[in-house]
Amino acid sequence: MTQAPDIADYVVVGGGSAGCVVANRLSADPSIRVTLVEAGRRDTSPWIHIPVGYFRTMDNPAFDWCYSTQPDAGLGGRSLRWPRGKVLGGSSSLNGLLYVRGQHEDYDQWAQIGNRGWSWADVAPIFEELETFQRGGAEGRGTNGPLQVSDPRLRREICERWIKAANATGIPYNPDYNGPSQEGVGHYQLTVNKGRRSSSATAFLKPIRGRANLTIVTQAQVLRIMINDGAAKGVEIVRPDGSRQIIQAQQEVILCAGAIGSPQIMMLSGIGDPHRLGVHGIEIAAALPEVGRNLQDHLQARLVFKCREATLNDEVRSLLNKAKIAAEYAMFRTGPMTMAASLVFGFLKTRPELATPDIQFHIQPWSADSPGEGVHPFSAFTQSVCQLRPESRGTIELLSADARDAPAIHPNYLATQTDRDTIVAGIKIARMLGRTEPLASAILEEFKPAPDVVSDDEILAWARQNSTTIYHPTGTCRMGADPQSVVDPRLRVRGVRGLRVADCSIMPQIVSGNTNAPAMMIGAKLAAMVLEDRAAAKIRNTSRVSANKVA
């Protein structure tokens, strides 16, 4: 554990996907003192850096907050586990390593509803400067950024059959879904560098840990933001031994604690709905009823098909095969241990009149009930399908005034007819592809759902009982130009000076794809805005001093 200084210019709360980028960019100016506070430990475990290590880190309290939702009516009253990274690098240290920017139209829509500066034309250069796309040579793709993005080092025949089956139905192969258009099928791009995970921590923190003006504090949970006369003045942290400390922020506090952590910390600090906070005896610092509202997530239906040919399930079943896989990785950094959560993607439309894809496929040459429980004892592969732009909205609410108590998560899945229709349509498309050659001849039987689940009502009932999160919570500190929004387009919290938020909680609408890459972009954009505002303030102060001298 690093000793935290008592004072800094900027205190960044959360060393995850966005927070690491913020700390990197702000501390690049040696005159700026930055303290990065992370509740989890340092990212020293080898399982974090081995791509397939998410099988060991997810649902593991050493690295994961291990959140659970409240029973959800849309899922038949089921409660879901919601993994979130509690380690340096945050969820980028234990996610499925898939690099997806989202559709250009997502960001244009943000701008159209009043968020100036967030259109695709505004954010595309940020994505480009953050990455090194190892394939190279593609327009709009970065070649000199800290984050390494590569093609998979692993392919499996069952996934290639799926691509060809999609092609046979008229769906085109797309070599770069992060390029001009997202639509089509192909191979995922990964945050992997030479067979090792490229997390936000390894990309943006590791190279700069020696900066004298940057302090990285781990195993320190933020209890509350210190607010005085309507301004954020610092944070109070607690260590595992119970000791507490206040870190003052001379300039700003920047929340990067994620779509669950950021609204929780704000509410604990008196920023939120006065009625809901009053229940817990929390004094109101700023009445912002939308804090914790607008929660969105991608719900995935995971279809499992038993196969006539061997899949990864068979490869990892014996100790001898596991030893061979480990040896291949140790010697060459290749093989199944380099595998991301999925090998093959599909971005498709459920209805021809749609302008852009509304569902996403994750194709995996293995099957399991959950990553932490091991693979099924038979040959099988998985088609996961999720709705890209759900209409349903949920909430994050406090269960107590104690920061160490997890908040209540109410996802409110499948609450609208569009969401229900879309998941049913996605499951039907997955089944159709499974019955198309050259994939059909490799399938022994449909395992989940069973073949007798046929009608729309039966499919929806199966989805309610079996679908799960794909780990993309967003939207709980909504950005907007309207006075009801939590943060303005420069990510400043309304009603509290010196406080900003930079993580997926600020998304007014969830992006059409995985959220790790957009989170890093948000962190970089926040840092740029902070530095712009800092420079403008210096100019104003200089002008004021000059005017006083003249007077």
Image: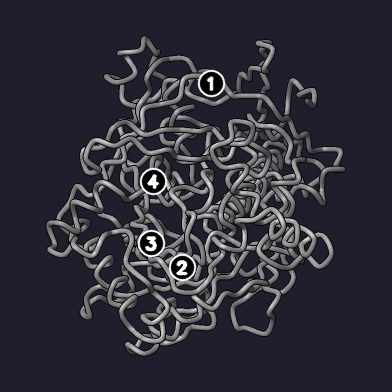
Q: Secondary structure at mark 3?
A: strand
Q: Is residue 543 visible?
A: no
Callout in the foreground (3, 1): 3
Q: Residue 304, which numbered label?
A: 3
Q: Are marks 4 and 3 in contact (CB under 8 Å)?
A: no
Going from the N terminus, do you reach mark 4 or mark 2 first? Answer: 2
218 and 484: which is toward the camera = 218
Q: Residue 363, which numbered label?
A: 2
Callout in the foreground (1, 2): 2
Q: Which quadrant of the figure contains the C terminus?
A: top right
- Residue at image mark 4: 475
Q: CA distance from mark 2 to mark 3?
A: 10 Å
User: Residue 13: where, in percent of width, then height?
Assistant: 61, 33
Q: CA distance from mark 4 to mark 1?
A: 21 Å
Q: Is residue 434 visible?
A: yes
Q: Secondary structure at mark 1?
A: strand
Going from the N terminus, do you reach mark 2 or mark 3 first? Answer: 3
